[in-house]
């Protein structure tokens, strides 16, 4: 789908496919694609390292454009969970932010926190250390560092504001502090949508392009009766 959209917008361009660490990587050979994306506010480089906001074109765009942006983001970055024995669940969107501009004292405190981190090893040989953010506060005295750990990534904050425009209730949760295999300290924040009416609004206004995720979402908003649920909402809006 992505390749078809690129060809539709820019004409036929050369796209090279690579399969790296269980992921299909697409490398586009035409510079005009990247240059035009940068002009509308796309992030240059790794999102977690740059900690930039959502593209200005989306922030200033129409509601339809914002819905399409959120659809693409949730297609790529979110997961849908449904309780096996109950007709409820939630959506979760996760974003990461590297900690930058650390003082020597802050680096020293983070080094101390490392001794309390759990260690995970990937099949590739990479090692990652992790601790829940709230637990890390027990070992940190620097108030400025604690504030750094409490701040969600700017990208996620912007996406939260977009959801507010659709009156989709959600919450942000600081999940973990991580030391990556490259030696970078990174925090992860999750955005949760779990209220039934908000899940239904998400289904109505945004939804998924990916069939497997859309099916799970439908089961959360009413299973096979999802269309009836939406018809009921539309009727209420007309009555208002």
Image (cartoon, rainbow, N blue to C red):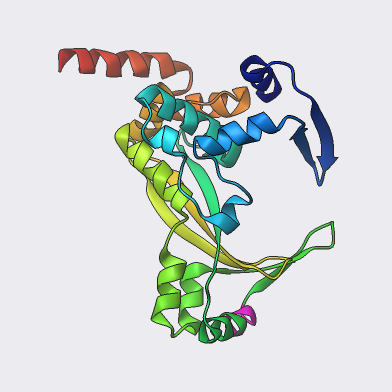
Residue 52 spot, x, y in % from top left:
49, 51
Residue 195 located left or right of residue 4: left
The residue sitting at 74% across, 66% down in the picture is 181
Residue 1 spot, x, y in % from top left:
67, 21
Residue 190 spot, x, y in % from top left:
49, 52
Residue 48 spot, x, y in % from top left:
58, 55
Q: Can residue 167 be seen in this view?
A: no
The residue sitting at 38% across, 29% down in the picture is 61
**Does the stretch in magenta take in 30?**
no
Question: In this rendering, is residue 28 above or below 43?
Answer: above
The residue sitting at 82% across, 44% down in the picture is 20
Q: Can residue 169 be seen in this view?
A: yes
In front of the other: 58 or 156: 58
In front of the other: 133 or 16: 16
Question: In this rendering, is residue 147 above or below 104?
Answer: above
Quarter of the C terminus within the rendering: top left
Residues shaded magenta: 112-116
The residue sitting at 41% across, 52% down in the picture is 172
Question: In this rendering, is residue 219 above or below 74?
Answer: above
């Amino acid at each position: 789908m992505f390749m078809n959209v690129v060809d539709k917008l820019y004409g036929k361009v050369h796209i090279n496919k690579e399969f790296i660490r269980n992921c299909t990587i697409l490398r586009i050979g035409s510079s005009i694609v990247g240059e035009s994306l940068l002009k509308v506010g796309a992030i240059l480089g790794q999102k977690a390292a740059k900690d930039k906001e959502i593209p200005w074109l989306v922030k200033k765009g129409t509601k339809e454009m914002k819905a399409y942006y959120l659809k693409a983001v949730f297609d790529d970055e979110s997961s849908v969970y449904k309780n096996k024995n109950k007709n409820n669940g939630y959506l979760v969107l996760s974003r990461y932010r590297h900690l930058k501009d650390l003082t020597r004292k802050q680096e020293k405190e983070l080094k101390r926190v490392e001794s309390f981190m759990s260690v995970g090893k990937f099949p590739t040989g990479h090692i990652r250390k992790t601790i829940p953010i709230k637990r890390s506060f027990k070992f940190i005295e620097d108030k400025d560092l604690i504030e750094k750990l409490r701040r969600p990534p700017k990208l996620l904050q912007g996406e939260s504001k977009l959801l507010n425009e659709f009156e989709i209730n959600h919450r942000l949760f600081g999940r973990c502090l991580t030391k990556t295999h490259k030696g970078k300290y990174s925090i992860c924040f999750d955005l949760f949508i779990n209220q039934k009416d908000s899940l239904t609004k998400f289904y109505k206004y945004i939804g998924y392009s990916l069939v497997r995720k859309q099916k799970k979402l439908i089961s959360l908003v009413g299973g096979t009766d999802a269309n009836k649920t939406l018809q009921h909402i539309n009727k209420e809006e007309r009555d208002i």
